[in-house]
Each structure stands twice: as C-alpha cells, then as structure tokens.
Image (cartoon, rainbow, N blue to C red):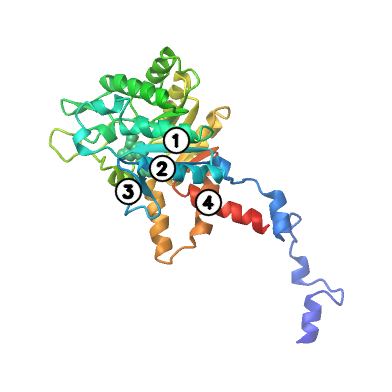
C-alpha cells in the first residue's frame, strides 16, 4: 500500500496519472480562505443607510395594533409612531415610508379623504417631520387606502379611469408635500402620473419634494398581508374589478419594465422602484443597467417578509442570515435603496456585527 501511494504522489519521480492531471492556475478559493480575505474582496455591502422602513399609522393614541400576517409589524397611533420613528432614526435608517389605515366610514368612491389636509395621514406626516426633521418621510400616492372600492384609481363604469385618477393623485401629492413629505411615491401605476404630480408640486412651489416612482409594480400575490393590514383589498362586488391587473404589470413581463422606466425618467421621477423584490431581481438589474445615473429602489414587500417570518418561527430558517442574504441579493442586483419591513432588525444586527468586530 505504502509504496503504491508513494508512487502515486510522484515521490519516486515517476510520472503518474495524478501528476498528469492539469492543476488549476486560477484558484478563486485563495481569496476565500479567511474572514479578512473575504472582507477585502467583498463586492456588495449592506448598511442601515440603504434602508427605508415602511410603517403603518392608524387613528387613536398611545398604542399599536399587531398585524397578524406580519409578525413584528404594527399599525401605530401617531404618538406611538413617533417613538418608532425615533428608534429607526437612532439606528441610522434615513427614512420611513408611511401608509395610513383609514376607517371605513371615511372611504368613498372618489377617495375624497385623500385630499383632506386635516386627515390622519397629513397629521402623521407633520408630527414625524416636526419631531425628526432629518428623517426622510416617503408618502404613498394611490387611492386604495381611501377608496370604498379598494382600488388605486377611480372606478368608473366598472373600469379604472386613468385620467380622472390623475387629478386626485396630483392633489393628494400636494397635500402630502404641504404636510412635510420629502418624497411622494406614486404606487398606483396610472399612466402619466409622474408628470401630473411633478407639475402640481411645482405649481405649488414644492420644487424640492422628490418623486420616488413605483416604476415597475407588478400585479403580485405578495401584497396580501399589506392589504389585510390596511383593509384595502379590491372589494368583491360585481361593479368593481376584482384585481389590479389592468394597471399593475403582468408578472410575465420584463421588457415592459423598460418602457415604464423610460416614461418615468422622461416625466421627471427622481428615484425609480421595482416591486416586489426577490422574484423581480432581473428587472432590478435591467433598470440599473438602463439608467445607471438614476437611483434605484426595490420594495421587499409584505408577502416576502411574511414568508421569512413564518419559516423562521417554525425553525426552518436562520432569520438573520436569510435576511442578510436576501437584502444583499437586492443590492447585488443593482438596487441602491431597499424598502423593507426587516429594516429595524437588519439595522440592529448590523450594529451588533460592527460592535463585535
Ligand atoms: C397600494 C400599495 C400596495 C403596497 C404598497 N402600496 C398594495 C397593492 O398594490 O395592492 C404593497 C406593499 C406590500 O405588500 O408590502 N397602492
């Protein structure tokens, strides 16, 4: 045995079959040997400064209501919202994306409460900006939280009326800007809304308020927990379209996202966004390649969060490692900004990792 082994390893100088095997000249493993090596050659970095935390606000005071399908997420009363916003800011998270839960009796077919300057939403925006002027507030421009039909646009004759909706979107963006929004974020997918909103903001002298556009927002089944949290799903009535497929994009389409991006850039969007995140990283990559000069965001949505939370709670996944990997994948694909319900946890973990060294 020994002698044959020796021979095999060339100790006798004999040419053996193993010696003849070609040795790799390039060994990528060389740069993976230690944590120090890996740190030096790491291509993508995640930091709290990349994250925006979506938060829900509801009427009432001094409390927060847990959202069943989104463990760790709440609908906050305005005062509880301030506490949460302060905690996020202290963690180095630069902004929040705020969504309102509007009581049913204030909803109607024209979503008129969306433009009430004294409504819950403008009050919440004002309160956050007064308490934390440096924390960016991204506001949602779409009718669904205020619509008795549960649609992002106005339902007219059983269809979503694009241009009637534009007028309301533009007016609500101005109300939000007046309340202190740093970015308005149209999530409605009506055609021409970025131009309509830009024009209205500028006419009201809000030239410094940015537009973060939901450029490629897909008709995804992953918004379920969010709609549940806000009771904002399309209403099951014969006169109301049962889904959002006539305005949100078909999950089968990638090239169409380029058209949406071209339109948004031409209409003046400051930041583009792809939504959801994980199943659409090809679209993130495509938009970052097409417009390297325009910041790109991705929305890691409620259903993506719910899947991770459920698997982690069952003990099937290591939550922290999985969240890092998912968020990194979004940055690697080309996103500069990530809207994620994991923001607070991720910022806390990143801080712990720095302290541990
Ligand atoms: C609606 C809106 C939705 C989300 C953000 N804004 C849901 C929808 O389009 O029905 C989803 C966010 C999430 O699932 O986390 N304008």
**Which residue is labeled 1 in the image?**
128
Mark 3 and ligand 1: say if the CB distance to the nearest ligand atom is below 8 Å: yes
User: In this rendering, is residue 321 above or below 106?
Assistant: below
Question: Do the residues under discs 1 and 2 have CB atoms within 8 angstroms?
Answer: yes
Kindly report the distance in space between the C-alpha atoms of the residues bearing marks 2 and 4: 19 Å
Q: Quadrant of ligand 1?
A: top left
Q: Foreground residue, 172 or 34?
A: 172
Kindly report the distance in space between the C-alpha atoms of the residues bearing marks 2 and 3: 20 Å
Mark toward the start of the polypeptide (2 vs 3): 2
x%, y% of residue 130?
47, 32
Q: Foreground residue, 332 or 303?
A: 303
Q: Residue furthest top?
A: 203
**Which residue is labeled 3 in the image?**
225
Kindly report the distance in space between the C-alpha atoms of the residues bearing marks 1 and 3: 25 Å
x%, y% of residue 319?
48, 59
Mark 2 or mark 3: which is in front?
2
39 left or right, relative to 168: right
């Amino acid at each position: 045995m020994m002698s044959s082994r020796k021979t095999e390893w060339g100790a006798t100088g004999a040419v053996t079959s193993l010696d003849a095997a070609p040795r790799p000249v390039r060994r990528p493993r060389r740069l993976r040997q230690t944590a120090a090596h890996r740190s030096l050659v790491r291509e993508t970095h995640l930091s709290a400064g990349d994250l925006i935390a979506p938060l829900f606000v509801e009427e009432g005071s001094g409390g927060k209501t847990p959202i069943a399908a989104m463990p760790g997420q709440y609908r906050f009363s305005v005062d509880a919202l301030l506490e949460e916003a302060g905690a996020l800011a202290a963690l180095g998270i630069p902004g929040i994306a705020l969504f309102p839960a509007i009581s049913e009796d204030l909803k109607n077919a024209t979503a008129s409460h969306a433009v009430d300057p004294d409504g819950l939403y403008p009050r919440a925006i004002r309160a956050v900006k007064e308490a934390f002027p440096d924390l960016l507030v991204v506001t949602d421009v779409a009718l669904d939280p205020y619509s008795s039909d549960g649609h992002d646009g106005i339902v007219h004759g059983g269809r979503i009326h694009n241009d009637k909706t534009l007028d309301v979107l533009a007016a609500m963006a101005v109300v939000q800007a007046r309340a202190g929004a740093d970015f308005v974020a149209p999530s409605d997918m009506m055609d021409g809304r970025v131009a309509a909103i830009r024009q209205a903001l500028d006419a009201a002298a809000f030239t410094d308020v940015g537009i973060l556009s939901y450029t490629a927002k897909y008709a995804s089944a992953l918004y379920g927990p969010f709609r549940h949290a806000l009771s904002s799903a399309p209403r099951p009535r014969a006169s109301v379209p049962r889904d959002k497929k006539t305005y949100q994009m078909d999950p089968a389409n990638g090239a169409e996202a380029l058209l949406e991006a071209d339109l948004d850039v031409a209409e003046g969007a400051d930041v583009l966004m792809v939504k959801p995140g994980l199943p659409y990283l090809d679209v993130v990559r495509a938009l970052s390649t097409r417009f390297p000069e325009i910041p790109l965001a991705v929305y890691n949505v409620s259903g993506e969060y719910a899947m991770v939370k459920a698997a982690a709670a069952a003990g099937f996944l290591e939550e922290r490692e999985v969240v890092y990997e998912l968020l990194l994948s979004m940055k690697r694909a080309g996103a500069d900004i990530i809207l994620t319900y994991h923001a607070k946890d991720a910022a806390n973990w990143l801080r712990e990792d720095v302290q541990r060294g």
